[in-house]
Amino acid sequence: MRSECQVPVREPVKALAQPAMSRRVFFGWWVVIAAALGLVVSYGPIVLATFGVFFEPLHREFRWSRAELSTAVSLSTLLVALIQPACGRLVDRWGARRVVLSSLVLFGSTLLALSAIRGKLGHIYAGYLLLGLFGAGTTPVAYSRVISQWFERRRGVALGLSLTGFGVGMLMMPPFAHAVITHWGWRAAYFILGATIVGGVVPVIAVLLRERPEEMGMLPDGRREASSRDLTRKGNDRTRTDGGVSWAEARRTLTFWKIALAFFLVSTSVHACLVHFVPMLTDRGLPPERAVKAASLFGFAILCGRLTAGYLLDRFFAPYVVASMFGGVALGLISLWLGAPAGFPFLAAFLLGLGLGMDTLAYLITRYFGLSAFGEIYGYAFAGVLVGGSAGPFLLGMVFDRTGSYAPGLVMLLLAVSGAIGLILSLASYASPKGGRFS
């Protein structure tokens, strides 16, 4: 299935041989910073994390019901999931930089427009549908492709560091939006968020986000080449590792469906617990303040998980790393199910948060399918993650309504995560960036 081709032999790039290059910070790390900054203001932190903050002021001013307001963000998230594969295809054809910059400009402009809406419910629906349409280009799909172009041997660390931006955004945006709303109102909050993206983030990303290291006379990981023979050998190695397969080929493999189904199951389980976490604890008699403090560990776990997973992915067989993190999610579900002792809710929140990282999904896609159609392949897999994130809270809530308890639902989620672990552990070996097979 994996076709190998020879890359054209070029003359050695003089810039690569300059000793000064070794004394500079590899530009790829600036690309990582740009990606992290972009993910701070991506769809998840800006739309999903802040919607609860906008909820009450919008309800108070326009008297829209909770169901009517919730429909806006539900439709928006569904649209992101539906068009994510098409967005990934655009990333493969046009390049991530074009997609990211245009998406951020339109995404931020929509937030600016939302600051001027009046009392028609259709306006908020239209605004959030546009946020979903343009927000699809701000997700980790585009950034992960760029990072994977710049890094081979340190790809896990680079992806993990870039995804910390998502965790920082999820932690920072709700209190930031709340502070602005408290002082100046919800219209000012929409305006400031939009202006920050268009006037602050977009210029920085335009400068730092570069598609490939070869465009700047560099090689992945900042490697230097001393001869034409070495350049040819390294180029051929990169072709074997990153050349990859098309989406049509990937979808006919069992490997893709194992990965996609595993992450769908874990996303369903983690997001179900994330949404129901506080009521799950308060129903058992835990004070609301303590339940909220425990829930805050989700964001901290995202940050810790991204840094730890990135380091481990570069050193160990990736399915083992992913399976261990899914195992943490299973332990978190068991902690919630047992409900005692007092420290278990905090342990459960931290372990469940470890399963929210999409850098591990991106890493698996690059290693098993390469980069030639990474955007589209990752887009389909990431769409499954989004669908699972939407379905999980609904399914757990439905089980609670029918049984009067979260326990049966937690058992079902534990079985789902156990199945995901089995799927990941059944994956075959993949080509190592250092040569040979990694298993």
Image: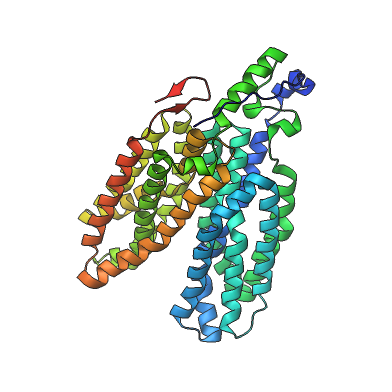
Report if residue 26 is visible in the image: yes
Judge from the rendering whether residue 16 lies leftward or rightward of residue 107; answer left or right. Answer: right
136 and 190: which is toward the camera: 136
Quadrant of the rendered image containing residue 212: top right
Q: Position of residue 5 (x, y in %)?
A: 61, 26
Quadrant of the rendered image containing residue 217: top right
Q: Position of residue 300 (x, y in %)?
A: 45, 49
Report if residue 289 is visible in the image: no
Q: Position of residue 189 (x, y in %)?
A: 62, 70
Judge from the rendering whether residue 417 lies leftward or rightward of residue 3; answer left or right. Answer: left
Instruction: Relative to 102, say whether 426 is above or below.
Output: above
Instruction: Relative to 280, say whether 57 is above or below.
Output: below
The residue under the point 63% across, 83% down is 118
Q: Position of residue 299 (x, y in %)?
A: 45, 53
The residue under the point 46% across, 43% down is 361
**Is the C terminus in the top left, top right, bottom left or bottom right quadrant?**
top left
Judge from the rendering whether residue 197 lies leftward or rightward of residue 318; answer left or right. Answer: right
The residue under the point 58% across, 69% down is 129
Instruction: Relative to 95, say whether 28 is above or below.
Output: above
277 and 64: which is toward the camera: 64
387 and 306: which is toward the camera: 387
Question: Going by the picture, which residue comes out furthest to the right?
Answer: 14
The residue under the point 71% across, 31% down is 214
